[in-house]
Image: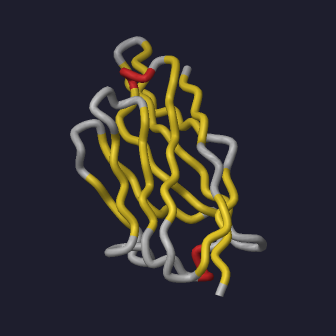
Amino acid sequence: QVQLVESRGGLVQAGGSLRLSCVASGSIFSINAMGWYRQAPGKQREFIAAITSAGSTNYADSVKGRFTISRDNAGNTVYLQMNSLKPEDTAVYYCNAEALKVVAGTGRIDDYWGQGTQVTVSS
């Protein structure tokens, strides 16, 4: 079992920066990867960034070159550094954790989600 707690978002002017954090607790050693998704009103939840336990990263095309995902050395906290923010980045941002559970020799991936935090970018 994994619990995720996100920091508060905020209101930022276009071109500004903001950093989000997400703290994982519980069975954190079972986590394979952590990431961030976002959802704007009337739209589907969108993948934006992920980082594996080995440190490899992946980004959506819409945020490449502007957002950076990272983890602390203990692996229990993930960050999303958002630079050059645009109004279209406005959304509720959700932290995600992917954990592996082995039952009877079979591996199963479980997903966990944070509560969501609002990021608003004004123009």
| Quadrant of the frame with the N terminus | top right
Residue 72 visible in the shown view = yes
Instruction: Give how far across and how far down residue 7 sits, in percent.
Output: 60, 44
Residue 44 visible in the shown view = no
Instruction: Give how far across and how far down residue 39 sits, in percent.
Output: 66, 64
Instruction: Give how far across and how far down residue 70 sits, in percent.
Output: 33, 48
Residue at figure coordinates x 36%, y 21% from the top left:
29
Question: Which residue sits furthest top?
Answer: 104
Residue at figure coordinates x 38%, y 73% from the top left:
66
Question: Which residue sits furthest right?
Answer: 42
Above or below — where is 97 with respect to 100? below
Question: Which residue sits furthest bottom?
Answer: 123
The answer to whether 21 appears left or right of 63 in the picture is right
Instruction: Give how far across and how far down residue 121 sits, in percent.
Output: 63, 76
Above or below — where is 82 with respect to 56? below
Q: Quadrant of residue 112?
A: top right
Question: What's the image's color scheme?
Answer: secondary structure
Above or below — where is 55 with respect to 85? above
Residue at figure coordinates x 52%, y 52% from the top left:
20
| Quadrant of the frame with the C terminus | bottom right
Above or below — where is 22 with respect to 24? below
Q: Quadrant of residue 52?
A: top left
Along the line of sight, the residue nearer the viewer: 119 or 16: 16
- Exactly how many numbered labels are in the figure? 0
Along the line of sight, the residue nearer the viewer: 109 or 32: 32
